[in-house]
Structure formats: structure tokens, C-alpha cells
Amino acid sequence: MYEPLLEVNHLKKYFPVTKGLLNRTVGQVKAVDDISIRIQPGETFGLVGESGSGKSTVGRTILRLTDKTAGQIKFKGVDIHTLAPVEMRKLRPQMQLIFQDPYSSLNPRVRVGDAIGEALLDHGLCTRSEVRGLVLEALEACGLSTYHIDRFPHEFSGGQRQRIGIARALILNPGLIIADEPVSALDVSIQAQIINLFSKLQQSKGLTYLFISHDLSVVEHLCSRIGVMYLGSMMETASRDELFKHPLHPYTKALLSAVPVPIPKLKRERIVLRGDIPSPANPPSGCKFHTRCPFAEEICRAEIPLFRDAGSEHFVACHLV
């Protein structure tokens, strides 16, 4: 086993809740509550869960776009939260983010070529005379034409804009790409094209992805390992095949039951969760999922389950397993 490219140990990110004229802190929103992840070079790790489970906050904290509350994040063996601003700036080209909304992530007044090549010049990775050729290579690698380089974002479709976002991250030759719901705003047919592009680029350039999504059918096609989050905590992690064939946590089973079946005859029992996801400012005691779990017992309400290995590198946090 190689040394992980990314190692996240017991990561916590809490946001203060303030009140009154003096902005006194009266509570905390536990957006990420004790998450651990290992991602090997060339691997795609999928992070799934409902909206509000803390997936995007994990990605932004890993990139140090927001400071952690506790825990450790190592990239290539270096704890990034110990780096000085100058050192962190040198590291940023190696860790790139692809946004959910491809249009709002692009400046409507900046031509596509300038938007893609801006970071190269900003970090001094090439000269101004070299940047246009590198931008054209990135556009071609992402399935766009050379004449697109001088156009503005409003002249492109949603799928083309997402390709531009991918090219902007790809041009820096990053070691890690965090894709935050990169296909959720696209039509289904375009989603398939973008997923195939992610796969093609990974094979040709040896990329490593942290792929954040709420859609398990998308994650199944792209990811080699999957982690399931609920209310800021990790419920289950396993390889893709193991998770889809033998899900252990009731929450994972409920998510999988909602995935459409391509063959109508292969019916799957639908598990409908009662109630809404609780507030991260006031999470339930014990297992956070017990308020919606149809199998919850008294121990689930009283004790936080340990995140333990159930065999075959299949980890789960559940008293019932």
C-alpha cells in the first residue's frame, strides 16, 4: 500500500452561532464532526449524502478555503494547516476545485482563454507567450474547440461551461481535484458526457479525485471507494462493489433503495425515511441517525457508535452491525 496522497484524520469544522448586539456565541453548527478519509494516488473517492450532511464543507476545509476546528489534513505527507500563507500559496496549484454551478464560477466579463490561463500566470508557472498554447491544449483535452478560447461564458451551454471549469483546474497539473457536485446542474445526457470525461482524464493523466455528490448512480460509475455522510459524520465507507452489493448501515440502504433500476423487472424495495434531517446546531444524542432509523434501539439513542471495520476494509458506524 502506497502512502496516501490525501489523509484526513478526525476532521471537525464547527461554525459559531451568535446572538445579540455583542454577537455572543450561544452555540455551534457542527457541519463536519470527526471525519477521517484516506485517498491513494490515482484513486477516485466518492463522498455522498443528503443536502446538509457537510460534504461540501469537507471539500472546502481540505482545500483550506475555510479553517478547521480540529483534526489533521495531510497532502503528500504535509499538514497543510501548519503551512505559512506563502507556503500554502505554492501548494494551491496542486489542489484544485471544480464547482457545482459552472456559470457562477466564471466571470461573465472575462474571455474563456483568460479565465483558464489566469492561474498559470498568477503562480508564475509559465510566461505570457506560452499561456495561449497551454490553454488550447487544455481546451482540446476537455472536448472543446480552439476557437472557443476568445468567447465569453454566456456563449456556452451548461455542459460546455463545466468543461471550461474542468480545463481551468486541469491546466495546473494538480495532484488532487475536488469535484463538488460537478454534474448535478446538468441534463442527464450531458451528465454522462462529463462523467466519461472525468474518467478519460484520470486514465490519461493519472488524476486523483474527491468526488462529492448526492447521486449514488453517478458515484457508482466513477468512484472506486465511497464514503456515506450523514449530519457531519461518516456512517459507512467501502469499495464501490462492496457498498452496492452489501450495504450495512440503514442509511446507506435507504439511499441505495432510491437509485433508479435500469431494468423494470428488477424491482427494489423502496425505503422511505421518516422526518427531516436534524439541525447540525442541535444534533441528536447517540447515533445521529436514530431519529429516522426504523431499526433504532435504546443503545442507539444513548451511545455514539464506533466507526469500526466489519471486514474487507468495510467500515461502518452502527450498533446493529
Image (cartoon, rainbow, N blue to C red):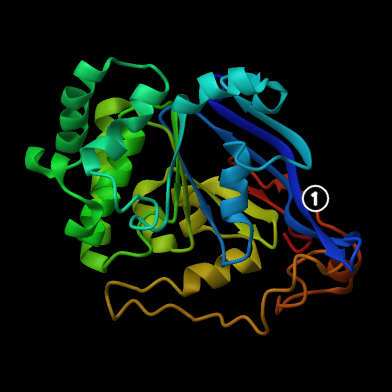
Can you tell which quarter of the image residue 37 is in? top right
Q: Going 60% across and 17% down the picture, which residue do you hit? A: 87
Could you classify mark 1 by the number of other residues whose Cα lies within 10 Å: few (under 14), some (14-19), or many (20 or more)? few
Residue 78 in picture, x, y percent from top left: 64, 19
Q: Quadrant of the C terminus?
A: bottom right
Can you tell which quarter of the image residue 232 is in? bottom right
Along the line of sight, the residue nearer the viewer: 101 or 285: 101
Residue 257 in picture, x, y percent from top left: 48, 73
Along the line of sight, the residue nearer the viewer: 321 or 161: 161
Q: Which residue is mark 1?
A: 306
Q: Going 79% across and 61% down the picture, which residue do you hit? A: 319
Q: Secondary structure at mark 1?
A: loop
Is residue 192 positioned above or below 238 on the image?
A: below
Is residue 61 positioned above or below 157 on the image?
A: above
Task: Name the amino acid, label 1.
Answer: Leu
Q: Going 25% across and 47% down the picture, which residue do you hit? A: 163
Is residue 47 rendered to the left or right of residue 73?
left
